[in-house]
Amino acid sequence: MSNTDYSAILSGAQGVSIKSSADCFTHTGEGLPVVVVENALCSAIFTLQGAHLLSFVPAAGEEILWLSPLAHFEQGKAVRGGIPLCLPWFGGHPDGLQSHGFARTSDWVLEQVSNQADGSTLLIVSLSSNAGTLAMWPHEFRFELQIEVGRELKLTLNVDNLSNTPAPFTYAFHTYFAVADYTLSPIQGLENLTYVDTIGEITRRYQAETLQLSGATDRVYLDVPELQTIIDGARQIKISSSAHSAIVWNPGDHADKMQDVLEHRQQFVCVERGDVFDNALTIAPHSRFSAVMTLSEVR
């Protein structure tokens, strides 16, 4: 557990506590501090490491996020499932640095917790540049994630480039959605779009119809509309975002070599929203970039 004392911040809000991940999940590893939110509208759990959402359950609804039953909780290691934050770069790094950036394995700071008039809970966490981050990404910065948990889960990412130089930037809300069977869960909202297929030789293809996965999939859809919908039996999972890319992923049979997935691959599909590939960004000096993603369940 972290030694940081958040008692003063937590004293101003109801239904929010900090626990060990071992109190909330069955997992391997030494464990991590997690923030647990419970209000009349929902429950949610996230780690301070990576500002990583692990669970979101609307009242009278089902879990929206998938967390691997084989997840490993260890300081400095990414946890399989939930919503890892991939930034300040997405995917591999040309210099061989860790994939998906350093934010998802860094310790964020809980800055604010407050109960809102509509019954939801607002939490704000932040990550600031230091000598270690500057060695990997040579820009002074402040990342802020606003987490609003209520009838919907709303994430607002604010990125402040505090340096004197333009900052190249890619990111993704790398969301793992819980479904009964990803091969029986069509994804609407990606029709008539170009995507980059990154399995094997990288190719560009055209998606004409509603997407239905049947095996290993790793696609980056470009210039996507605001809304996508996953059909999971009787429920619909809505994904609304200001981001311009959508990454759709499931390892299929490759999961047999992934010790924190294995036979559980059928139980999730990743539909990640971000700005990557052709939609990559450059943040001007001393300016802010913001992105929003909202998740909800409809029956």
Image (spheres, rainbow, N blue to C red):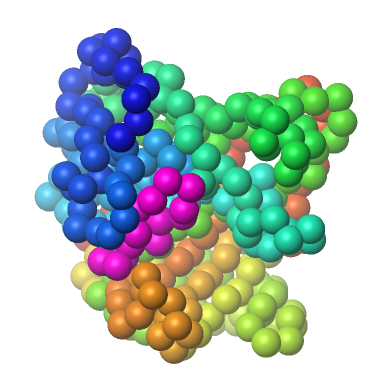
Q: Is 75 inside the magenta-drawn segment?
A: yes
Q: Is 159 inside the magenta-drawn segment?
A: no
Residue 15's x, y, as percent? 17, 27
Q: Is residue 192 above or below residue 200?
A: above
Give the dominant element type of the magenta stretch: helix, strand or loop. loop
Identified at 46% across, 26% down, the residue is 109
Identified at 70% across, 30% down, the residue is 131
Q: Is residue 289 above or below residue 58?
A: above
Q: 70 or 245: nearer the eye?
A: 70
Q: Is residue 250 above or below residue 114?
A: below
- Tell me the quarter of the picture where residue 209 sits: bottom right
Identify the image quadrant of the C terminus. bottom left
Q: Is residue 151 visible?
A: no
- The residue range painted magenta reads 65-82
Q: 187 or 285: nearer the eye?
A: 285
Q: Is residue 189 visible?
A: yes
Left or right of residue 30, residue 228 in this image: right
Left or right of residue 148, residue 280 in this image: right
- Tell me the quarter of the picture where residue 91 sits: bottom right
Identified at 66% across, 79% down, the residue is 197
Q: Residue furthest front?
A: 30
Identified at 51% across, 28% down, the residue is 126
- Tell me the quarter of the picture where residue 39 sits: top left
Identify the image quadrant of the N terminus. top left
Residue 4's x, y, as percent? 36, 22
